[in-house]
Amino acid sequence: MNIGIDLGTANVLITMGKQGVVLNEPSVIAFNKKTEEVIAVGFEAKKMEGRTPDHITVIRPLEDGVISDHNMTKSMIKFFIEKVTGKQLIMPDIIICIPSAITDVENRAVIEAAKTAGAKKVWLLEEPLAALIGAGIDISNPDGNMVIDFGGGTTDTAVVSMNGIVVRRSIRTAGNKLDRAIVKYIAARYKVLIGEKTAEEAKITAANIYNPDGTKTTVVKGRHLIRGLPERIEITDYDIYEAIIDPVAEIIAAVKSVLEQTPPELAADIFKNGIVITGGGGLLGGFDKLLTSELGVRCYNADRPLESVAIGASIAFGKMDELLDGFKHVSMLT
Ligand SMILES: Nc1ncnc2c1ncn2[C@@H]1O[C@H](COP(=O)(O)OP(=O)(O)OP(=O)(O)O)[C@@H](O)[C@H]1O
Ligand SMILES: [Mg+2]
């Protein structure tokens, strides 16, 4: 049995054998501080966010692309693996794609978690390789391909050729930061404090960062900062643009810097092949168009951008030999 895991800041996806994606849940865990028990994981835990009494905390252990709480991360991974494998006796082989910013200690925590959940062998696969493979791109040739994985916690840009990463840059600016920027902007402009979840919904429904024209609007609810009472206001794509253009510009600058460091032959390949965008952040209204016009290279979203990394992990099982360089820590895991 083969299991592929995309351990994302916002979402964890798991693929199983040929079944494709069998689990897709938020990377959230709820914990009872009194009894030291895990109360809920995934969807169930996300529902509790912002709604708990003092003794219960809701944690996003992978927030911002780093594993901030090893034990919580472990519990979460173990829970998800056991959820998909059930009570089967066959020990699965597992490929895990982890955020690039995490350290070796944290890698170890991830591996341990997979092992306690019953894994026979565990491999860690570089995320950009998984993203490209999952987007249906053949990365084995001497031909340059570029991917921007714009997720919740990190935006990871890489140029890949012959199954290896040639240039790479990862920044901690992605979807979550955009949400926080919207919260800040609405507070400053309208004196209304909204929650991050509300900000995310507004971003998803009303963003158009390529040519905002006031036609996309949405209603947000929050608390008026001076009157202290609940308030609803209508905001437009102009507001969203103003709120998030700075972090978006940071992302574009990071992508540009990768292109600038790319050797000329590979840069020519990328110009011909275009740049594939994976991750949920890339669905931001107008992002592909803005990036295309800023770079002068065609940038497009993968078919199922939220699933690319997980699908790539499942396909990687069939490419173990050729991909070997893209895996980390292979020896210590057997
Ligand atoms: N239609 C949309 N428009 C804008 N943003 C979106 C859209 N759909 C999802 N997102 C954003 O995508 C992000 C989640 O993407 P994804 O699931 O790829 O992240 P992740 O893999 O968990 O994070 P990371 O790769 O950084 O660890 C969230 O910030 C979410 O708000
Ligand atoms: Mg991701």
Image: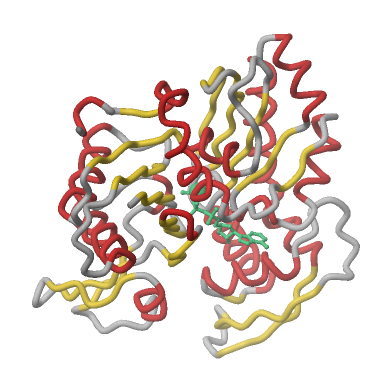
Q: Residue 123's spot in the image, x, y percent? A: 32, 37
Q: Quadrant of ligand 1?
A: bottom right
Q: Nearer the viewer, residue 143 or 175?
A: 143
Residue at the image point whose x is 71% and y is 81% from the top: 219
Q: Nearer the viewer, residue 2 or 185?
A: 2
Q: Residue 226's spot in the image, x, y percent? A: 56, 81
In this rendering, the answer to whether 136 lies above or below 311 is above
In this rendering, the answer to whether 245 lies above or below 130 is below
On the rendered structure, is 75 left or right of 100? left
Q: How many marks?
A: 0
Residue at the image point whose x is 31% and y is 82% from the top: 52
- Name the outermost residue toward the left: 35
Q: Quadrant of residue 83?
A: bottom left
On the rendered structure, is 134 left or right of 50? right
Residue at the image point whose x is 52% and y is 86% from the top: 228
In this rendering, the answer to whether 166 lies above or below 149 is above
Q: Residue 312's spot in the image, x, y percent? A: 52, 43
- Name the outermost residue toward the bottom: 229
On the rendered structure, is 4 left or right of 138? left
Residue at the image point whose x is 60% and y is 37% from the top: 132
Q: Residue 190's spot in the image, x, y percent? A: 68, 73
Q: Quadrant of residue 191?
A: bottom right
